[in-house]
Image: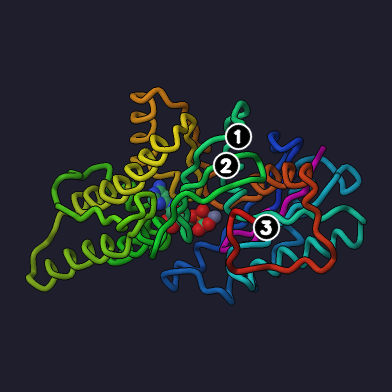
Amino acid sequence: MKILAIESSCDETAAAVVEDGRKVLSSVVASQVAEHRLYGGVVPEIASRRHAEVISKVVSQSLEEANVTLNDITAIAVTYAPGLIGALLVGVNFAKGLSYATGLPLVPVHHLRSHIASNYISNPELKPPFLCLVVSGGHSHIVMVEDYTKMKIIGKTRDDAAGEAFDKAARTMGMPYPGGIELDKVAQNGDPLAFKLPRPTVHDAPYDFSFSGLKTAVINLLHNAEQKGIELNKADVCASYRYAVVDCLTTNFLKAAEDLNAKKLVIAGGVSANSLLRSTLQDECKKRGYEFYMPEKFLCGDNAAMVGSQGYYEYLSGNIAGTDLNAYATMSIEK
Ligand code: KG4
Ligand code: ZN
């Protein structure tokens, strides 16, 4: 069964054709990052307008590259929540129009569920149940994936998401948006123990995260040094900060795994591309005898292949939208 998938929740317009949830026949991603970089972050109205301009072309290209026509497609999957509302509406409305014109069923897909599904593409043997750390620019969740479409939130951030915390610190150091990627690269040459940074925890909620205090601590460190005319070693700051963020993420994730007796661990979302997060969890899971899965790096960021994968399982579970499908800026992954 071939699914045509569409994604426009943030600053990537993407379309893909995916067979049986696991085989990617095509995946086209048109990124707007270069334009948003001029403003230091995503400008929602610009994002919506760029999606509107390129979506037809991106979808046609995904069909061409898969060497199929709409006659070969069984269903249309689209990201409908959460994300920038104006951006989501472009994809949702395009998918609705296409569904109306072709009579193909429309499958609504939750963005974070699709990030998790990127793992089904990279790891064909992976099946639920498993415990997943979902870390993106907007969310940081520990999720028990009981089945393909049944999820339970075990922990989440109380303030900033991990990606946001990386991006804001990177911005203070003059790195271009989205700074998390460059911060990760610069950190490779630094000493993670050079600067002592806090490891904030949330009282009575051992699986929840809080990154705002840690982010403020590194920004204060940078500002204080600047005021005193001291030049800090940038690689050391990046390495110490990356170590602190990854330490918070892995500590809570591994504690949740231990407490819940979960022996299959998975990571997903843009921040799952972070090299220290990947290597730390790989080592820790090996030590503990857990199975560990992660998406290939090119599937960590936003794309439509992951929407086609999750869309397949949503379709099988009977999740078909009517013509009144709307988009939502926020929505729990559990629904
Ligand atoms: O999942 P994603 O592409 O978009 C959202 O759904 O938010 O995640 C984007 C986030 C950005 O904050 C970006 O800086 C971060 O993922 N990111 C990274 C790395 N690659 C992307 N953060 C740390 N290390 C990386 N290597
Ligand atoms: Zn995302």
Tell me the element at label 3. Answer: strand
Residue 8 part of the magenta-drawn span:
yes
Q: Amino acid at mark 3?
A: Thr
Q: Position of residue 81 (x, y in %)?
A: 63, 62
Distance CA(mark 3)–CA(mark 1): 21 Å
With 313 as the anchor, is 118 left or right in this view? left
Residue tagged by mark 1? 128
* Image location (x, y in percent) of residue 180: 38, 55
Residue that carries the numbered disc 3 in the rendered image: 79
Q: Residue at x 19, y 55 (%)?
A: 197
Residue for point 44% across, 73% down: 39
Q: Which residue is mark 2?
A: 145
Q: Nearer the viewer, mark 3 or mark 2?
A: 2
Instruction: Check contact, mark 3 vs mark 2: CB within 8 A.
Output: no
Q: Is residue 103 left or right of residue 248?
A: right
CB contact under 8 Å: marks 1 and 2: yes
Left or right of 37 on screen, residue 29:
right
Q: Is residue 3 magenta?
A: yes
CB within 8 Å, label 3 to label 1: no
Q: In which quadrant of the rendered image does the N terminus lie?
A: top right
The range drawn in magenta is 1-14
